[in-house]
Image (cartoon, grey):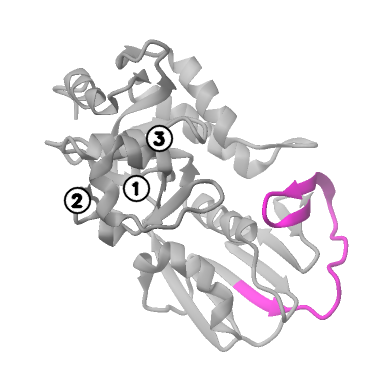
Amino acid sequence: MTTTSAQVCYALNGQVIGISAERTDLWQDFDRMLGSLRVASIAEPSFHVGIAGMALAPETPRGSLVFDGEVPEDGRCRMFQDGEIIHLVFASQILSIHGAEGRAEIRIRAENQINWTVWMLVLDAALDAGGQHMLHTAGLTLPDRDAIVLIHAPSGTGKTTTSLALASQGFGICSDDAMIVTAASADTAAWGLPRQVKVHRKTAEMLPFVSPCLGPSWDRNGEQAISLDCLRDIVRVEDSSVRPVLAVLHLARSVDGQTRLATMARTDAMVALAADNVRTGMTGLLPLQKRRLSTIARLVTAVPTYTLEVGSRPADSAALISAALMGQG
């Protein structure tokens, strides 16, 4: 492996992920997401990522092929499993995750940047090594408590709109899209990934109070990214502290424009969360995915689960949630 000359470290709720490379620009995309969690470099981080140069095209690694297909924005990808070792192969780079050893290696051609897919799998592996798992959910604190409600829904259903609407009613935003859950004990807890909030045109029209944070340009998906610093000027944005989880809400669109909150069967909540968060390969569930599924099972067992049908006035859900969780936590 090429001798490294620079390192950066990030704190992930007790886990420290360290990244070493000859070029500091190689981790800039990762730093844009986790820069607020950066800590002083240490000799032995909990999980280490080494980045090295690669002169030739990636070879076919050992193991069973578990995925072969196109990844949005990043191109064709193949994934191989060799016991607990996972290899992710792109045309210009290869990621090898040695989860049991608490390390990963990225080999990349000199003229390329590391794919976003690679960085997200690195983050998943580092969290998994510490008994934590990232779930595709929003997380908000209640107005009068430091505890969290998690709001789950597939992309495009309205997590960001609902999160901002709740924030306008005194809830605090931990994340509108990615929460890190730890369910290793009876006390289920979570913290939010500190990244920008993407706001759609329709959300901006429905919630005009966000307009001070918006510019004139929208991307091809009709979205803009709002920095957390700007968002703090108009609503409460929480830090990345770990907080207890009070409930899981599954978000759905109301067919008649009315907002409702109803109890959801735990098995249904688990299926909904698993469908959006657990990936199956050609050979079944990979070890990390099995552990994520186990975390989801513990989560829905430990806290009440609800269906939140959001109508034409998403802010109406604030009173319903507060009333349902009164006296808990």
Picture layout, residue 201 above or below residue 42: above
**Amino acid at circle 1:** Trp
Q: Position of residue 206 (x, y in %)?
A: 32, 34
Label 2, label 3: how many angstroms apart (C-alpha)?
A: 18 Å
Which mark sits nearer the N-terminus, 1 or 2? 1
Residue 220 in the magenta stretch? The answer is no
Which mark sits nearer the N-terminus, 3 or 1? 3
Q: Position of residue 219 (x, y in %)?
A: 52, 53
Q: Position of residue 133 (x, y in %)?
A: 48, 45
Residue range corresponding to the magenta coloring: 50-78
- Asked whether the residues under the numbered discs 2 and 3 touch, taking CB atoms below 8 Å apart as contact, a structural biologist would say no
Q: Nearer the viewer, mark 1 or mark 2?
A: 2
Residue at the spot of label 1: 191
Residue at the spot of label 2: 234
Q: Nearer the viewer, mark 2 or mark 3?
A: 2
Which label is found at residue 159?
Answer: 3
